Amino acid sequence: MKIAIAADHGGYKLKETIKEYLEIRGDEVLDLGTDSEESVDYPAFGKACGEAVASGKAERGIVCCGTGIGISIAANKVKGIRCALCTDTHMAEMSRKHNDSNVLALGGRTTENKKALDIVAAWLNTDFEGGRHQRRVDMLDSM
Ligand code: RB5
C-alpha cells in the first residue's frame, strides 16, 4: 500500500519509527517531513498529508505530532479526509470498520513506540464494514 506520512517536531521520532516499520512490511512510504526535531508548525504537515491522500497520491496517511490532536485537526480540514486520532488498537479498528478512516493520527509524546506500531498494524489490517456505515460516511464527505 502507498502510505503518506507526516509529522511536526513532536511527532518526528515516532514518524521515523513508523516509516521503518512500514518499509519492513513492504509498504511504499511517501515521507512529507518534517526531517528533524527542530520546531515547525503542525498545520502545514497535516494539510500536506491530507492533500496527498485526497488527491490519490497515497492510499492512506499517517500523521504524528506531540499529542496527535493538532495535526489530526489539520488533516481533517482537507475535503475527503477522515482522520482518526487513536490511542489504542480498538479505536484504530473501529475507525476503519465504522468510519472508513483514511488517515491515522498518533501522539509522539503520548503513545510509546511499541503501542503505536500495534495501533498502525491494527489500522492497516482492518477493513471498512460498509453497510449501514456507508451512508454516514457519505454524510461526512458531503459536509
Ligand atoms: C508542539 O509543541 C505541539 O503543540 C504539537 O506537537 C501538538 O501536540 C499539537 O497538537
Image (cartoon, rainbow, N blue to C red):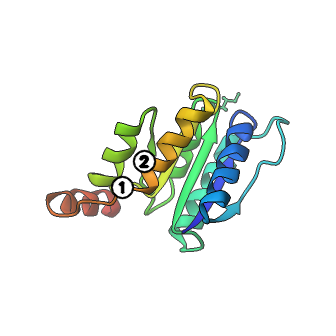
Q: Is residue 84 left or right of residue 9?
A: left
The image shows residue 124 at horizontal and vertical percentages of 45, 56
Residue beneath disc 1: 126
Residue 81 horizontal/vertical position (percent):
45, 58
Q: Which mark is residue 69?
A: none
Q: Which residue is pictured at 51% across the width and 68% down the height?
A: 59
Q: Find residue 40 and report its image quarter.
A: top right
Q: Residue furthest front?
A: 24
Q: Secondary structure at mark 2?
A: helix
Please state which amino acid type lies under the numbered disc 1. Answer: Thr
Q: Is residue 122 above or below residue 79?
A: above
Residue type at the position of mark 2: Ala
Residue shown at 16%/63% (left/top)?
A: 131
Q: What crowding class fits label 1: few (fewer than 14 Cα within 10 Å), some (14-19), or many (20 or more)?
A: some
The residue tagged 2 is 122
Q: In the depicted view, which residue is nearer to us: 89 or 40?
A: 89
Image quarter for ligand 1 equals top right
In this picture, residue 110 sits left or right of residue 131: right
Q: Position of residue 57 (x, y in %)?
A: 60, 73
Left or right of residue 138, residue 31 in this image: right
Tag 1–tag 2 contact (CB < 8 Å): yes
